[in-house]
Amino acid sequence: MQVWNVKSILEWAINYFKGKNINQPRLSAELLLSSVLGLDRVNLYLNYNRVLNKDELALYKKYILKRLENIPIQYILNEAYFRKIKLRVDNRVLIPRPETELMVDKVFQILKLNSGMEKIYILEIGTGSGAISISIAYEISDELKISGELWEIIATDNNPEVLGIAESNARDILGSSRTGKIKFVECDLVPAGNSDFLKEYKGKINLIVSNPPYISKEDYKNLSPEVRDYEPKNALLAGKTGLEVYERILKEIKPYISGDFCYILFEIDPARRIPLEQITRDIINPEEITVDRDYNQRDRIMSIKV
């Protein structure tokens, strides 16, 4: 009978994934085995001779079979890492990408340049798993050296089940004291009409942050099966041009923009930078638009100084 230790099972799984053309075969094999054994990836290699027991082998086999269906690792394990936090995720929420982490860096960069505010109001539109808002709340005290009384985050989403996931993540990660600093609001982008929300936050928002759907209908058809078949369509597909949601956001956030200072941060499709800049100028006539590049040197984070 074959005795499987960490070294032998990893080598087999990596080669098996390669033979089946699974994306990132080594990473897939390592992350799935790390979860089965309760080890991080570094410690896998420090425990090369550890022999897997029957239950561990059965669970690893189950994960491998799911991965062969191109199910994303994060959905198999129901967890995703983002900056300094671990989030619970499933196929109702978009898997947070490393590029999106740069949005949080940009938030802190802008706030450091505009210190001295009595209170900072941050609005995230389309929070999904809560990755951006929770990361800001998790890191803001260390980054800005300010107390919890001096900031507030409002996170919106149009799906109550998704908001439930974000709220659960906030409670697990932030604890009771800081969870209350994020107000989760169910609405389509922002509350419409003459709402109590508008009355409360009119002219107050200093930072509007969003990673909205920005895939066009044509591009959606060409997404990898791993993304197209498993991640939520409404978090990816924007419409015919890919610019539709940006345009709606720019129109609907106008009443909330603070007169003291306000920036809008968008994650963008590099191919649509120019038309998005033009739409932004047409709708809100900003003072300045800049774009930062991601880890692959592609235009990714648009900062709009209103």
Image: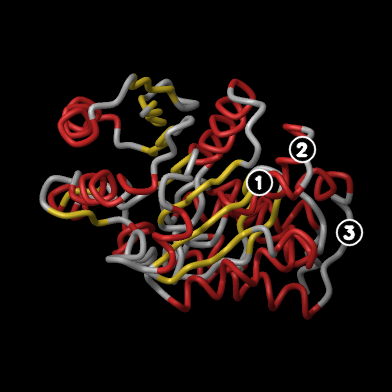
In this picture, residue 36 sits left or right of residue 125? right
Q: Residue at 43% x, 71% y: name it.
A: 186
Q: Report the Cα–Cα distance between label 2 and label 1.
A: 8 Å
- Provide residue 197's location: percent of width, then percent of height: 43, 64
Where, by quadrant of the figure, is residue 101 drawn?
top right
In the depicted structure, whether residue 240 falls above or below residue 172: above
The first of marks 2 and 3 along the sequence is: 3
* Residue that numbered label 2 is attached to: 146
Q: Which mark is residue 151?
A: 1
SS class, disc 1 = strand
Question: Residue 30 at what x, y percent from top left?
Answer: 67, 52
| Residue 289 lies in quadrant | top left
Using the image as rendered, state which of residue 76 and residue 82 is in the foreground: 82
Q: Position of residue 202 (x, y in %)?
A: 41, 51
Numbered circle sitting on residue 50 = 3
In the image, residue 58 sits, relative to residue 128, either above or below, namely below
The amino acid at mark 2 is Ile
Q: At 25% from the left edge and 28% from the top edge, which residue is drawn? A: 273
